[in-house]
Amino acid sequence: MTITVFGATGLVGKHVIDLALAKNYTIKAFGRNVESLIDEDIKSHHQLQAIKGFVFDEVEVYNAVKGSDAVISVLGGSFDGLDKTRSLGIKNIIHQMNNANVKRIIALGGMGILNDSQNKLIIDSPDYPEIYLAVGKEHLEAYNYLKTSNLNWTFVCAPDILNEDADGKYITSADYPPTPNKYKINAGNIALFILNELEKNEYINHRVGISNL
């Protein structure tokens, strides 16, 4: 399987690359500084291609997704909502995937985009923490682009992400937070879930709540 990874040098992206290479996937790692930030011990891996590019550039993104079986977007950005990498980046990725006839994408967002017990978005709750509101709106915009696309998408809605390896001890739920919910998830467990979902396709056109066990 050939996968294009956006956000490859971020916290979750690095785990995605490590686990995907262990599965013998071919990885196209895309980013502005990707060549200098990819860990030295995997730079020379014959199934890893570092692609220097800008996620808002139509031609560069098209060339990165063309010929891939799937796309993983674990794009980051600033916390104040001023950086539109998450939302407008996803918009361009979706557009170029359609141009390249690539249909499968798994993207990462925040837990606020899940439903609460009243079937409303958590982010719309009056007691939603204001500190998360700006970045949550970016995740919501990214989700709306995916939801209205014709792609086979999965949107992983993560709580606080820990810089920890995968241990396989996590729980998931479609469209709602999982039970139990510890409000924390290892970066490695997110990567592990994403790669498992690429193989199993259990959450096509769904948001996914996830938590460590």
Image (cartoon, rainbow, N blue to C red):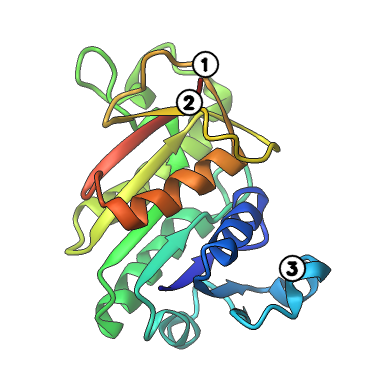
Going 69% across and 36% down the picture, which residue do you hit?
164
Q: Is residue 126 above or below residue 33?
A: above
Residue nearest the observer in this picture, 44 or 93: 44
> Which quadrant, please, contains the N terminus?
bottom left
The residue singled out by tag 3 in the image is: 38
Please state which amino acid type lies under the numbered disc 3: Ile
Q: Please tell me which residue lies in front, 26 or 101.
A: 26
In this orientation, which residue lies closer to the viewer: 137 or 48? 48
Dot 2: element: strand
Verify CB contact (< 8 Å) between mark 1 and mark 3: no
How would you rate the neighbour count of disc 1 (Cα within 10 Å): few for under 14, some for 14-19, many for 20 or more? some
Q: Residue at x 30, y 84 (%)?
A: 100
Q: Amino acid at mark 1?
A: Lys
Task: Find the distance from the CA under tag 1 to the CA under tag 3.
Answer: 31 Å
Mark 2 sits on what residue?
A: 211
Mark 1 or mark 3, which has the lower sequence index? 3
Ranked by sequence position, the earlier of labels 2 and 1 is 1
The three-letter amino acid code for the residue at tag 2 is Ser
Contact between marks 2 and 1 (CB within 8 A): the answer is yes
